[in-house]
Each structure stands twice: as structure tokens, then as C-alpha cells.
Amino acid sequence: MQKLLSEAFYLEMKKLEPKYPTRLALLLPALHAAQKETSWLSPVILEEIAKYIGIHPAQVREVASFYTMYNLKPVGKYHLKICTNVACILRGAEHLVKYCEKKWNIQCGETTSDKKFTLMEEECLGACGTAPAMMVNDDYYENLSVEQLEALIERL
């Protein structure tokens, strides 16, 4: 099997290995590092991680599919995750979702045709006190209004 992950990925894993009690404990850091490198975790990437760690590919898929932070299909350059848990919904998150869906003519879980934006609902971003909250890639935005969201999108 041809390696798709870079030498930098493998060097990072070798550097992390002594910090963990087993190779299995490297699974989450490996998934993060691979996704950072490739933007999403394809089945072949998951297999490559499984082979490196020494576990069955199904175990890697189980973990990657459990956590919403891992992308198991391609995402746009800007991955918007709008929290739709109770605090955010009560403070207007549904308006943020509807705004994006209408603006881009997509539904949650879809990517714009130019591959620039992917819109997702997130169960909870842990920002209940500053709701509604959203992540764009790895950055948090809180206390959002539709107007603030629109200005942010224009800057992107």
C-alpha cells in the first residue's frame, strides 16, 4: 500500500510515541495530524493509520466516526459548524443556519459547489454562556447575530 501521509506525519508520530503508554493511545493524535494534513479522513487514510498503529481499520473507523471533529468526507476551505444545542437555539442559532442555507443554496452537511464553504450543525460547542456559537475551521465565534455572521463570511 502506497503511503499517502507525509514524512512529517510519521516524524510527528515518532516524536509523540514516548509520551503515550501504548501505540493505541496515539490514535486520536494520529487522526488529528492526518486531518490537519489532508483536511478529511478518507478510508485509505484511516487504513494507513490503522497499519501504522497496528490495529484493525474498523477500530480506526469506529473512533473517527464517533467524534464529530473528524471529517469523513471532503469539506470546503471554510468548515462552518453552528451549535444547535438548546442554549444556542434559544439565542437564535436556527437563524444562522437558515441564513447560510439560503445564502449558499445548500443544506446542513453540504458543501458549496465552489468547495469554499461546508455547513454543519454541531451538537454542542461548549459555549452556552456566549451562545449562539459557531466554529470556522478551528476558530470559535460567539454571541453571533446574522449580521455578524454575514460580515464574517464576507471577510472569508
Image (spheres, rainbow, N blue to C red):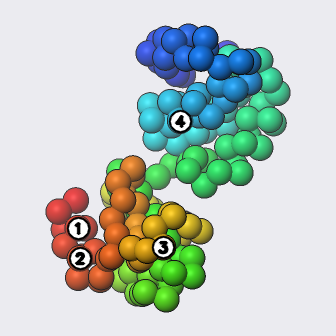
> Vertical placement of 75 versus 39: above or below?
below
Residue drawn at x 67%, y 43% as measured from the top left:
64
Q: Which residue is mark 4?
A: 32
**Marks 3 and 1: in contact by CB < 8 Å?**
no
Element at label 2: helix
At numbered mark 4, what does the secondary structure look like: helix, strand or loop?
Answer: helix
Q: Which residue occupies the foreground of this view, 116 or 92?
A: 92
Label 2, label 1: how far apart the Cα atoms are: 6 Å
Residue located 51% across and 81% down the image = 87
Q: Which mark is residue 148?
A: 2
Q: Is residue 51 visible?
A: no
Q: Are marks 2 and 1 in contact (CB under 8 Å)?
A: yes
Q: Which residue is tagged 1?
A: 152
Q: Which residue has dot 3 on it?
A: 128
**Mark 4 or mark 3: whose residue is earlier in sequence:** 4
Query: How many angstroms separate mark 2 from mark 3 (CA)?
Result: 18 Å
**Residue 19 location, x and y as percent?**
59, 17
Q: Check disc 1 and report its element: helix, strand or loop.
A: helix
Check disc 2 and give the amino acid type: Gln
User: Which mark is first along the chain, 4 or 1?
Assistant: 4
